[in-house]
Image: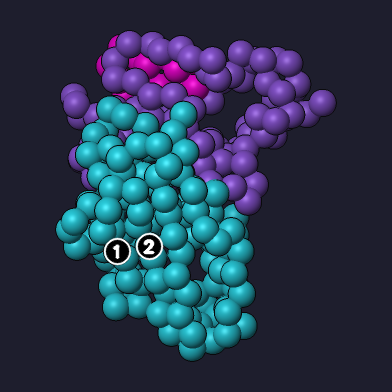
Chain colours: A cyan, B purple
Amino acid sequence: GAVVSQHPSRVICKSGTSVKIECRSLDFQATTMFWYRQFPKQSLMLMATSNEGSKATYEQGVEKDKFLINHASLTLSTLTVTSAHPEDSSFYICSASSRGRKNTEAFFGQGTRLTVV
Amino acid sequence: DAKTTQPNSMESNEEEPVHLPCNHSTISGTDYIHWYRQLPSQGPEYVIHGLTSNVNNRMASMAIAEDRKSSTLILHRATLRDAAVYYCILRDRLNDMRFGAGTRLTVKP
């Protein structure tokens, strides 16, 4: 299957700083990317959907000014957690798909465990 | 509002088949049924997907009810490495990829 690389896998940052997470599709054109957040023992919660070259569509309750998503190319999307606070500590996961087609599988990154101290 | 319903947990013995059910009574005619699984501390991985007919691949099989209101993921011989949370997902919009609670599968040696 296709490969989606997410970096970093773990990050610890101080409260009030910003953290950038990268998600790269290594061998296919990711026209649509999804960003999720997952708390311990819970399911993945969709934060936003982004199509290459367009602004991301955020789910209700997700602050777009706090979770900045950039999807400027077909192989790279980034999520920046701005002014991070301890409650933002979570497991963040990206997923990439081609043209948002529902009859194709989505491929996931390895996840980023963010700890805000 | 999850569009699929799965049991919270299931247990299986190693090397025995496992049938993981999923109910999706509000499925529309053009929804694809996808299955993914997530091992601890990892991102989900694709397992299988289909529309109407039963499908097979090297990882698993999926049986889809005739009315498409339910499906079953079949692992033919469970191994310890199959212990994971299994998610059944309907893709009903081009940009939709939402997860329900999933089924936590425990495989006993």
Q: Position of residue B78 (x, y in %)?
A: 68, 21
Q: Where are the magenta residues, as a range?
A: B61-73
Count of marks overlaid on the render = 2
Q: Residues within 10 Å of mark 1 (few under 14, many from 20)?
A: some
Q: Nearer the viewer, residue B68 or A89?
A: A89
Q: CA distance from mark 1 to mark 2?
A: 5 Å
Give the chain letter at badge 2.
A
Q: Nearer the viewer, residue B38 or B88?
A: B38
What type is the residue that disc 2 sits on? Thr
The C terminus of chain B lies in quadrant = top right
Q: Is residue B48 above or below residue A83?
A: above
| Residue A20 seen by the camera | yes
Give the chain letter at badge 1.
A
Instruction: Please report whichever mark, 1 or 2, sits nearer to the chain's N-terminal start.
Output: 1
| Circle 1 SS class | strand
Q: Residues within 10 Å of mark 2 (few under 14, many from 20)?
A: many
What type is the residue that disc 1 sits on? Asn
Q: Quadrant of residue B84?
A: top right
Q: Are marks 1 and 2 in contact (CB under 8 Å)?
A: yes
In the image, taking residue A37 as reference, residue A114 lies left or right, namely: right
Residue receiving disc 1: A70
Q: Quadrant of residue A76?
A: bottom left
| Residue drawn 18% across the image and 24% down it | B29
Q: Is residue A65 above or below residue A27?
A: below
| Circle 2 SS class | strand
| Residue drawn 28% across the image and 27% down it | A103
Characterize the magenta stretch by its predominant secondary structure: strand
